[in-house]
Image: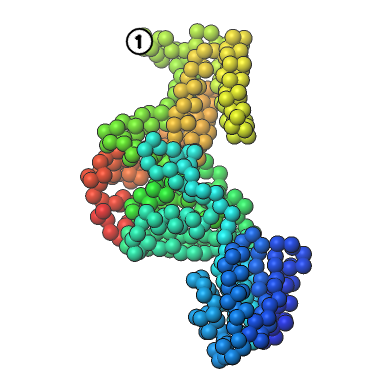
Amino acid sequence: MVTNKLNKSYDKNVAFLNDYLGVDQSFDIIQLDLHYAGRNMSMFLIDGFAKDDILHYLMRFLAELKEEQLEPDTLIKLLRTYIPYVELDTVDDLIEAGDNILAGPTALVVEGLDKIIMIDARTYPVRGPEEPDLERVVRGSRDGYVETIIFNTALTRRRIRDRSLRMEYTSIGRRSKSDICICYIEDIADTGKVKLLRDHLKKIDTDGLPMAEKTIEEYLSGRHWNPYPTIRYTERPDTAAAHLYEGHIILIIDGSPSVMILPATFWHHLQHAEEYRQKPLVGAYLRLVRFIAVIASIFILPFYFLMSSQPNLLPDTLAFLGPEELGVIPLLMQFLIAEVGIDMLRMAAIHTPTALATALGLVAAIMIGQVAVEVGLFSNEVVLYLSVAAMGTFATPSYELSLANRIVRIILLCSTAIFGVKGYVIGITGWLIYLIQMNTFKTGYFWPFIPFSGKALFDVMIRTPIPLKSKRPAFLDPKDPDR
């Protein structure tokens, strides 16, 4: 790490910071030349980050000082008496001071001192905590994480008032210096997993994190072309708190309203807060319906294609399966065109203003879908089964998992079209083997199915009542296994 120790000359220190920060080249970097208590002082701050009222109050305090009031032990008297503020720190390195200024705190350089006083009187532009669009619930809290790390740590600590809750700060990015917080409950979380995460984060060497948590995920996941997410995201503080109590680790990144939950298995991406906001029997029913929807989103199209292309496999009771009219293009091409069309519609919906979203839906449903069937481009059965698969995709709680399942569905569809029954069976078998051999932070991705744990598997499949869940998940190796 490059360092530049504080110089004995006040003027050289101010000149260095002026040059390092480019004060004359950026209008929002402010340098104030001050003179209080017979000493030259200089204040460096970022316009828009500094709290003007607090700095104005501190400057009034300093303006009333007499020269003899700062002698002797000037630094101690300023820190303990004459700068009445909560968040104060000192640095003796000019580069470190410059990097801190760019992060928001204000630097006070005082003539004759061998340290720079850092005043953390900063504020960031922030929106109010709102309920996340992707994780809405009928009953429950309506607050959600925002893009400011301090707000997010406060929302988390509000729900966990445990003395062993740890918020470890670090930064990543040679240029961006993005703030990162590793959050865990020390009395519960496995020390080895926390250390493993720290080591992984230290190895990240990049200019910055333009995509925040998604950039970090690509460094942590390892397999760059693996479509399946090994890290779960949430924008709900209550969901994050529930995982912390289980022994998970939360990674909070400044600039992102989503926090990362580590480690996360395949089944974690199928859970939703709504299941725990209802009675246990209702929650178990909702989870069962969700599993059915997700399974249908992966397998129903390849299965329907297989039964349509080889009707001899169907028993007489299922003879109604298969298209009555094949349409003007092959069945496989109908599915592939429809799949691409749904993705096009999804992307168009993201970029469409809310006021026009309804109009977009009408155009897609009536002008495109209905006309495509009437002219014979698609058969009615293709539209029906594709709609079922699409509903299963949208019912998947994890957006990342739903996209991965969509890719698997297309691959299964193609393998079934090429190799028939063998392609369908081999495709499913290969998909299962791929998921089983995956790991997330040295944990089996398909746990508790592989490695098998009967009680944990039952808890995954059935939403059990909270009073009956007396143990934390064993795969997390919690220090305190009892709830």
478 or 397, which is in the foreground? 397
210 or 406, which is in the foreground? 210
Residue at 49 percent of width and 48 percent of height:
129
Q: Position of residue 107 (x, y in %)?
A: 62, 73
Q: Position of residue 199 (x, y in %)?
A: 48, 63
Q: Is residue 113 above or below residue 427?
A: below
The residue sitting at the front extreme is: 64
Residue at 32 percent of width and 62 percent of height:
187
> On the rendered structure, is 104 left or right of 419?
right
Identify the amino acid type marked 1: Thr
Q: Is residue 422 above or below residue 432?
A: above
Identify the image's colour scheme: rainbow, by chain, secondary structure or one colour.
Answer: rainbow
Q: Is residue 267 visible?
A: no
Residue at 52 percent of width and 64 percent of height:
170
Q: Is residue 205 above or below residue 217?
A: below
> On the rendered structure, is 61 left or right of 132?
right
Q: Is residue 373 above or below residue 100?
A: above
Q: Residues within 10 Å of mark 1 (few under 14, many from 20)?
A: few
Question: Where does the N terminus fall, quadrant-wise?
Answer: bottom right
Which picture quadrant has residue 307?
top left
Residue at 35 percent of width and 45 percent of height:
447
Q: Position of residue 311 (x, y in %)?
A: 44, 12
> On the rendered structure, is 330 left or right of 240?
right
The residue sitting at the right extreme is: 25
Q: Position of residue 297 (x, y in %)?
A: 45, 28
Number of numbered discs present?
1
Which type of secondary structure does the marked residue at label 1 adopt?
helix
State the residue position of label 1: 317
446 or 71, which is in the foreground? 71
Q: Is residue 134 visible?
A: yes
